[in-house]
Amino acid sequence: MAIVIAAGFSALAAKAQTVVKVDGSSTVFPISEAAAEDFQKLKKGAVKVTVGMSGTGGGFKKFCIADASLRIDVADASRPITAKEMEACKAAGVKYVELPVAFDALTVVVNQKNPLNSISVEELKAMWEPAAQGKITNWKQVNPAFPDRELKLFGPGTDSGTFEYFTEATVGKSKSSRGDYTASEDDNVLVQGVSRDLGGIGYFGYAYYAENKSKLKALAITPAGGKTAVLPSEKAVIDGSYNPLARPIFIYVNADSAKRPEVKEFIEFYLKNAGKYSQEVKYVPLSAADYKHAADNFGKLRTGTAFGGHNEVGVKVSDLLKREPKE
């Protein structure tokens, strides 16, 4: 009898230790964290969902790593998988399902005492392009109408999908940026930096601005060649006027992991509730039809990416979900 009890206890312990590993984007983190917390409550401790925040690039490194024992099940990503990451996954034998989960309004913020209310894409390029390093050090150098104040730049690290998207949308080339800025994968560090420096300017996902409106001012963005500056908002993202800083954000699911019941159930739960969680953390949910299409793609384990290994600015999720994925 003792042996039977011990065996039964061992089986229960093993079941209690079932783990789903999620890591990657700090932008997607609030949605994944909310989904993980509620799913764990639903499963009453039978499944543990760990959610890390090592940046989009850091997440993909763990997602595509050759050693399967070190691999995560789900990569949070604030931009599409790159060609280099696609090659790493292929070499490691990792197939994946790409699932958009929300829209984010990438937000440019300044100190609340900064008199500016808007900025153009051309002015952001002048601040952030590689040629500005060590040369553009005062706001007035960007625009004579700007304050005569030292320019202090704060932004995500180079492993961040937000960094990659912002540089492509403003400078015109992914990862093309000056290096003399305060970088962190933790958006809360960037919030503190800008809020404490009168000359500070930074950028991150809208959720982190929404949490810190009392400390920061969001700038309206004038697109390249445009005349009207637009503030980040749900309406502006949906109607397409918040250009070029509105972007879809994703989770990538390892196709082999998806065959495990706990992972399959977690992703189904995630997609069913992603709209609600997105609104709760101040992102913009996809349409009901888009979530259904994503759930169908997951159910069929439709592997690959709708992108060719690079970012696309101004893309529609409904179009992405219909594309023939590439691996």
Image (spheres, helix red, strand yellow):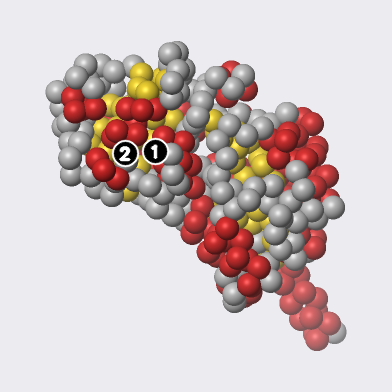
Q: In the rendering, at what x and y percent does residue 256 appear? A: 75, 66
| Residue 85 in view, yes or no | yes
Q: Is residue 117 left or right of residue 268?
A: left
How crowded pointer 2 is (Cα within 10 Å; few <14, some 14-19, many 20+) is rated as many
Image quadrant where residue 283 sits:
top right
Name the quadrant of the C terminus: bottom right
Q: Is residue 113 left or right of residue 263?
A: left
Q: Is residue 270 left or right of residue 249?
A: right
Above/below status of 217 relative to 62:
above
Q: In the rendering, at what x and y percent does residue 94 appear? A: 68, 67
How far separated are the C-alphas under marks 1 and 2?
7 Å
Marks 1 and 2 in Cβ contact (< 8 Å): yes
| Residue 272 in view, yes or no | no
Q: Which residue is mark 2?
A: 128
In percent of the image, x 20 and y 36: which residue is there? 136
Identify residue type, mark 1: Val
Q: Nearer the viewer, mark 1 or mark 2?
A: 1
Q: Residue furthest front?
A: 225
294 vs 315, nearest the viewer? 315
Element type where label 1 sits in the image: loop
Mark 1 vs 2, N-terminal side: 2
Count of all numbered marks drawn on residues in the image: 2
Q: Which residue is mark 1?
A: 171
Element type where label 2 sits in the image: helix
Q: Is residue 143 left or right of residue 321?
A: left
Q: In the rendering, at what x and y percent does residue 69 appear? A: 62, 75
Image quadrant where residue 224 sits:
top left
Q: In the rendering, at what x and y percent does residue 267 appear? A: 73, 50
